[in-house]
Image (cartoon, rainbow, N blue to C red):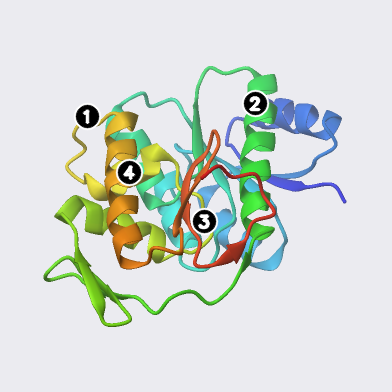
Amino acid sequence: MNKHVLIVEDEAKLAQLLADYLNAANFTTHSLANGLEVIPWFQGHPADLILLDLMLPGLDGLEIIKGIRRFSNVPVIMITARVEEIDRLLGLELGADDYICKPFSPREVVARIKAVLRRTQGESEISIKPGPMLVLDGHSFHISAYGRQVGLTAVEFQLFQVLYQQPGRIFSRVQLIDKIYQDHRIVSDRTVDSHIKKLRKKLASLLPDIELIHSVYGAGYRYIPQAKLDAQASP
């Protein structure tokens, strides 16, 4: 079955161009031009991905993402002419899966849509099974399981909490940076990798026979409590 992409773009010629390229790539599409129409339409129609312009009449893209994330994890790719870092970070903080800056190549948009769908479909192919009974203490930054506990730094605790609250969901490094460094400081991907490495070591001391945090090549990290992996992942 063809994947359905909802295009939310108020420039009619650009919306049609995107629709033409997506249709040629075997996607089905529907286009909306007013931000106020998006959530009501999506609540009544299926869509596998939303291609969402940031600047819209009626309701802007960031408010739309915020509204959609109250009831759906549908993949969202932002399209923006704003190049300010704060707008991109805020969009990802609210739950966008990727962003594309104008001007862009329609072929690039199609490629990014395919990449996001591959990543999110990989999440749905994971069968999540009950994992260890963990207790997260946000006051002392301790995690407990089966009568044992391990202490984390504040950043390590926030990082684990983000992953733990949505088992199976892949978080990119950028998304993790946005969630644990809300002052929008500049932090490199290597910093996230370093925190993950230390966090894994501490979790291994608590639960030596279970790997809770998994790397997904080219995508990021996810928390899987004792799961069967059908998507490609590296330890």
Residue type, mark 2 in image: Leu
The residue at the point 34 percent across, 31 percent down is 189
Residue type, mark 4 in image: Lys
How busy is the neighbourhood of tag 1: few (under 14 within 10 Å), some, or many (20 plus)? few
How busy is the neighbourhood of tag 4: few (under 14 within 10 Å), some, or many (20 plus)? few
How busy is the neighbourhood of tag 3: few (under 14 within 10 Å), some, or many (20 plus)? many
Marks 2/3: CA–CA distance: 31 Å
Could you tell me residue 214's position as x and y percent? 49, 50
Which of the two discs, 3 and 4, sits closer to the camera? 4
Determine the secondary structure under disc 4. helix
Q: Earlier in the sequence, mark 3 or mark 1?
A: 3
Determine the secondary structure under disc 2. helix
Left-right relation of 174 to 10 = left
Question: Which residue is disc 3 drawn over?
Answer: 169
Q: Earlier in the sequence, mark 3 or mark 4?
A: 3
Could you tell me residue 150's position as x and y percent? 21, 66
Determine the secondary structure under disc 1. loop
Question: Which residue is disc 4 drawn over?
Answer: 197
Could you tell me residue 119's position as x and y percent? 62, 44
Q: Is residue 68 above or below residue 112?
A: below
Residue type, mark 3 in image: Arg
Q: Nearer the viewer, residue 178 or 89?
A: 178
Q: Earlier in the sequence, mark 2 or mark 1?
A: 2
Q: Nearer the viewer, residue 41 or 1?
A: 1
Label annotation for residue 14: 2
Marks 4/1: CA–CA distance: 20 Å
Question: Which residue is disc 1 drawn over?
Answer: 186
Q: Would you say the residues marked 2 and 4 are in contact, meaning their CB atoms lie under 8 Å apart?
A: no
The residue at the point 38 percent across, 43 percent down is 175
